[in-house]
Amino acid sequence: MVLESAIAAGARLARRGEFTLRAFLNGRLDLSSAEAVIDLVDAKTERSAADAFRRLSGGLSRAFEAFYASAIDISARVEHALDISEDELPPEFASGIMSSLDDLAGDLQDHLRTAREGKLLREGALVVLAGPPNAGKSSLLNALLGESRAIVSPLAGTTRDSIEEWLEVGGWPVHLADTAGLRKSSDPIEAEGVARTHDLAARADIVLALDCDIPGAMRIHAKCDLGPGDGLAVSAKTGEGLVELKDAIATRLSELSAKADGSTGADVTTRQRELLEIALAALSRARGFLSSSEWVLAAGELRSAAEAIGRLIGKVYSSDLLDALFSRFCVGK
């Protein structure tokens, strides 16, 4: 009755993301903060939620605002140079522009280095179990999940397609994949499964190689209850080594996501990474033009860089961008 009366009075149901969109349009949030709201709602682990909340607190937004102000300043200085005679420019003008440009490019690069952490926390790390038939991949998957998800059989080639499940490991959301055993097969279905194993392993953040050597993979000695072997000793049957394996996965993910200086901090989203790369490319081209005193071309590239950075925080945006971004929200956010 209350809802019917409200509708009769002209009320309507809120659209997806409408409240956050209004906050953005009224200047209470920028686009990077709005994206953090989405990630906070969709967070799969406490670590993912903490990361989203850290970005929502404004640190990343303040950094992007500073980048935008710097890009506008550099662009304005070059535009001003176009309006006066080159003889009127001070001797250090060009070198000052170069120095400012290099400082901005370095700051953008620092933030790009955190892109992988953001991807891992939002989308989950792909961890692939790979190895020959009967190496214990399905048993290990079940043991890590704590449930019987994959069929376990003494017959070789039981797993012909990948089986994927979500798992939290040390605060990291992990996409765990069991795969077909690595071997040559005349069976076209099994051969396709093996091909998919190679494809998953190539895309994986971490590959757990069970009793085999795969370049770059973590060597696992599965079924250690049956005897010694090379690699981290794990037994799905007794539970030995499972805690150590999870710790090793979490450590590897931390190493993959760490900044060059070993620190951690607010990461960037895929959209933000793409815009940072566009801005960096434009700054690089601008630097080349400045080196050859082609000021007009440099000015154009600097405008492009400033526009890309402005799109990070919503200084520059389109209705299509807003529709795509806020449609990811659930109703009531």
Image: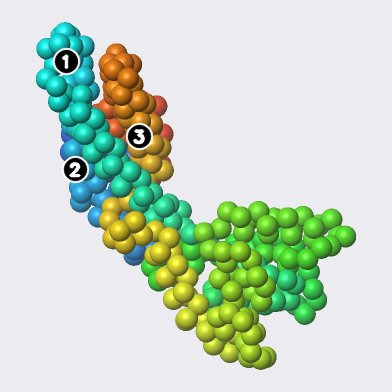
Question: How many discs appear?
Answer: 3
Horizontal arrangement in the rendering, residue 112 relative to residue 6 (left or right)? right
Horizontal arrangement in the rendering, residue 216 relative to residue 55 (left or right)? right
Q: Are marks 1 and 3 in contact (CB under 8 Å)?
A: no
Marks 3 and 2, the one that precedes in the sequence: 2
Q: Are marks 3 and 2 in contact (CB under 8 Å)?
A: no
Q: Which mark is residue 222?
A: none
Amino acid tagged 3: Leu
Residue located at (64% from left, 63% from top): 163
Residue located at (20% from left, 24% from top): 94
Amino acid tagged 2: Arg
Q: Which mark is residue 80?
A: 1
Position above or below: 52 against 145: above
Horizontal arrangement in the rendering, residue 154 relative to residue 75 (left or right)? right
Q: Position of residue 167 (x, y in %)?
A: 49, 67
Q: Which mark is residue 62?
A: 2
Residue neighbourhood size for the residue with mark 1, other residues' Cα within 10 Å, grouped as few (<14), some (14–19), many (≥20): few
Residue located at (34% from left, 56% from top): 260
Marks 1 and 3, the one that precedes in the sequence: 1
Amino acid tagged 1: His
Q: Position of residue 121 (x, y in %)?
A: 40, 57
Instruction: Classify residue 199 by image quadrant.
Output: bottom right
Q: Is residue 53 visible?
A: no
Q: Nearer the viewer, mark 1 or mark 2?
A: 1
Quarter occupied by the C terminus: top left
Q: Between marks 3 and 2, how big is the CA–CA gap?
A: 19 Å
Q: Are marks 1 and 2 in contact (CB under 8 Å)?
A: no
Say which residue label 3 marks.
280
SS for dot 1: helix
Q: How is the image coloured?
A: rainbow
Position above or below: 88 against 145: above
